[in-house]
Amino acid sequence: IILDVRTNEEYNDGHLTDAKLLDIRNPVKFIEGISALDKSKSYYVYCRSGVRSAQACQLLNQKGISNCYNLLGGIIEWKGELTSK
């Protein structure tokens, strides 16, 4: 499962296909969102540069999700296609 932890505006500018938005800058909704995730799944997390997604992975780990992977360098290092809204 792909998680985009950027803002709604950043997400709408372009995101990975099928990425689920969980804005880490909205802490209440972010914690609610990660609390509802299936702990048995694997999560691939990204933001703009990799800093917010690293923080998100730490929080996911604290919530008991051990299969969490940070996209190093964020979406600015992504070479693949993006979807825009």
Image (cartoon, grey):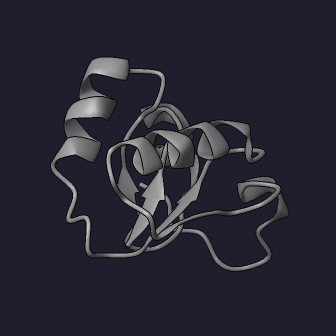
Q: Quadrant of the C terminus?
A: bottom left
| Quadrant housing residue 73 | bottom right
Image coordinates for residue 11, horizontal then vertical, percent: 49, 46
Q: Residue at x 27, y 19 (%)?
A: 28
Q: In which quarter of the image is the N terminus?
A: bottom left
- Nearest the eye: 8 or 69: 69
* Number of disc labels: 0
Image coordinates for residue 5, horizontal then vertical, percent: 49, 43
- Nearest the eye: 12 or 41: 41
State the residue lying farthest toward the left: 36
Q: Which residue is drawn at 46% across and 39% down?
A: 59
Relative placement, left or right, of 65 versus 11 is left
Image coordinates for residue 51, horizontal then vertical, percent: 73, 38
Image coordinates for residue 74, horizontal then vertical, percent: 74, 54
**Is 42 placed above or below 48 here?**
below
**Is 54 placed above or below 24 here?**
below
- Nearest the eye: 82 or 46: 46
| Quadrant housing residue 79 | bottom right
Relative placement, left or right, of 41 versus 79 is left
Q: Which residue is drawn at 37% across and 20% down?
A: 27
| Quadrant housing residue 46 | bottom right
